[in-house]
Image: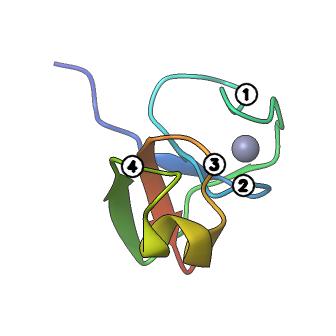
Amino acid sequence: MAKNKKRVCKECGRLIIEEKNCPICKSNQIVDKYKGRVLILDAENSEIAEKINAKENGNYAMKY
Ligand SMILES: [Zn+2]
């Protein structure tokens, strides 16, 4: 089984598992250090999404 190498887009905070570039903002500024993660299910109405500036649903990192 492949290792689950989770990384984070430095630009938008999107959690990235397989992709080389961020699927949201296409950035290649990927870091592998972050302190927590949050799953955004309703990006348009979520207070957390607003706080971390998440514009799409999915996994995001916090304090990256
Ligand atoms: Zn991004």
Give the colour scheme of this rendering. Answer: rainbow
Q: Which residue is mark 4?
A: 42
Q: Is residue 50 left or right of residue 43?
A: right
The numbered mark, 4 or 1, whose residue comes first in the sequence reads 1
Q: What is the quadrant of residue 21 in the picture?
A: top right
Q: Label 1: how many residues lie within 10 Å, few (<14), some (14-19) or many (20+)?
A: some
Q: Tell me residue 62's x, y (percent).
A: 49, 74
- Residue matched to label 1: 21
Residue 17, how many percent across, how many down?
Answer: 44, 33
Cα distance in 3D space between marks 3 and 2: 9 Å
Q: Are marks 3 and 2 in contact (CB under 8 Å)?
A: yes
Q: Which element is circle 2 on?
A: loop
Name the element at disc 1. Answer: loop
Mark 3 and mark 1 in contact (Cβ < 8 Å)? Answer: no
Amino acid residing under circle 2: Cys
Q: Quadrant of ligand 1?
A: top right
Q: Sequence-wise, which precedes: disc 3 or disc 4?
A: 4
Residue at image position (58%, 22%) is 19
The alpha-carbon separation of the residues under discs 4 and 2 comes to 17 Å
Residue drawn 30% across and 36% down? 4
| N-terminal-most mark, 1 or 3 | 1
Binning the other alpha carbons within 10 Å of mark 4 as few (below 14), some (14 to 19) or many (20 upward) gives some
Q: Position of residue 5 (x, y in %)?
A: 40, 40
Q: Is residue 3 visible?
A: yes
Name the one closer to the observer, 12 or 19.
12
User: Which badge, 4 or 2, is on the more N-terminal residue?
Assistant: 2
- Label 1, label 2: how far apart the Cα atoms are: 12 Å
Point out the image quarter for the C terminus. bottom right
Circle 3 sits on which residue? Answer: 55
Select label 4 or label 2 by which is in front: 4
Asked if marks 4 and 1 touch (Cβ < 8 Å), the reply is: no
Q: Amino acid at mark 4?
A: Asp
